[in-house]
Image (tube, grey):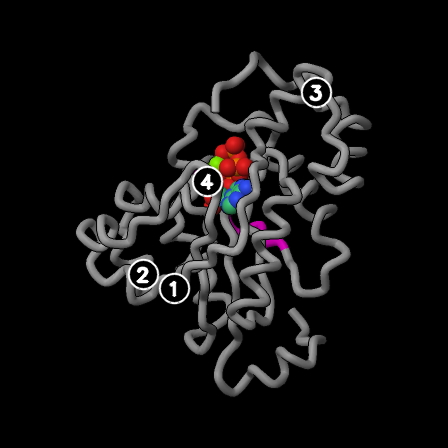
Amino acid sequence: MALTDPSEANAKEGGLRLGIFGGTFDPIHIGHLIVAEEARAYLHLNRVIFVPARVSPFKLQGTAFSPEDRFHMVELAIQDNPYFAASRVDIDRQGPSFTVDTLRAMHRQYGPQAQLFFIMGADSLQGMGAWRAPEEIIRLAQLIAISRPGFRIDMHTLEQKIPGISQVTHIIDTLQLGISSTNIRNRLRQGLPIKYQVPAPVEAYIYSHNLVKELGQLEHG
Ligand code: ATP
Ligand code: MG
């Protein structure tokens, strides 16, 4: 990809600072965008790359919306932010999307000089002990953990499961965004408005492609 942003040209010597933001984005919402922008600003990232999962290892029953619809909605949501990009690397890889594979792919694409920062909400961070190869994840990337209502960030307990994780984790506790894709899907099922919870082009995409009919029953969460 061409380096059009002057901050990227300046960063070339020390290596690009790349935020990697994984998730199912089922659908993407403004919480994701606010979290990504906060991480970018706090850690002076040159770019944040949104990486929609094909299948989450923790949601093997699948997503509500198809990978292509989720990817397209991510593209629509980020189009007005020059620092944001989307990658198909997980969508195009068969099988569950393991973060360790995503990070290896990013290192192959951007070279060993690139500094990777994996962005995640407090719920994801708390669950990391159960992820594939977490000790390799923290060798490949630093972590940016963002507060989320209902989830505690407990680095002490996490450090016992994944030694060394505290040293590579940046905690951002300035946000408390009570918004989730689960809640948005439930609102759609109930015919409630999602205006302002997702960017306007994402809302328009959902209605114009009749995606509401793809949703099954109400979910807990
Ligand atoms: P779902 O309810 O389907 O799990 P979600 O809103 O949690 O959807 P995901 O795609 O699962 O969205 O999340 C992608 C990443 O974004 C995760 O690391 C998650 O913790 C983070 N994230 C999502 N929403 C928020 C939020 N409101 N505050 C902080 N982090 C968030
Ligand atoms: Mg989630």
- Residue 67 appears left or right of 144: right
Residue 212: mark in rendering: 3
Q: Is mark 3 within 8 Å of ligand 1?
A: no
Nearer to us in this view, 84 or 145: 145
Is residue 54 among the parts visible in the rendering?
A: no
Verify CB contact (< 8 Å) between mark 1 and mark 2: yes
Image quarter in which the N terminus is found: bottom right
| Image position, residue 161 (x, y; %) | 20, 49
* Front tag of 2 and 4: 2
Q: Of the residues under marks 4 and 3, which one precedes in the sequence? A: 4
Q: Are marks 3 and 1 in contact (CB under 8 Å)?
A: no
Distance of label 1 from label 2 (alpha carbons): 5 Å
For label 4, the residue is 94
Q: CA distance from mark 3 to mark 1?
A: 37 Å
Which residue is label 2 attached to?
138
Horizontal side of 169 relative to 109 (left or right) equals left
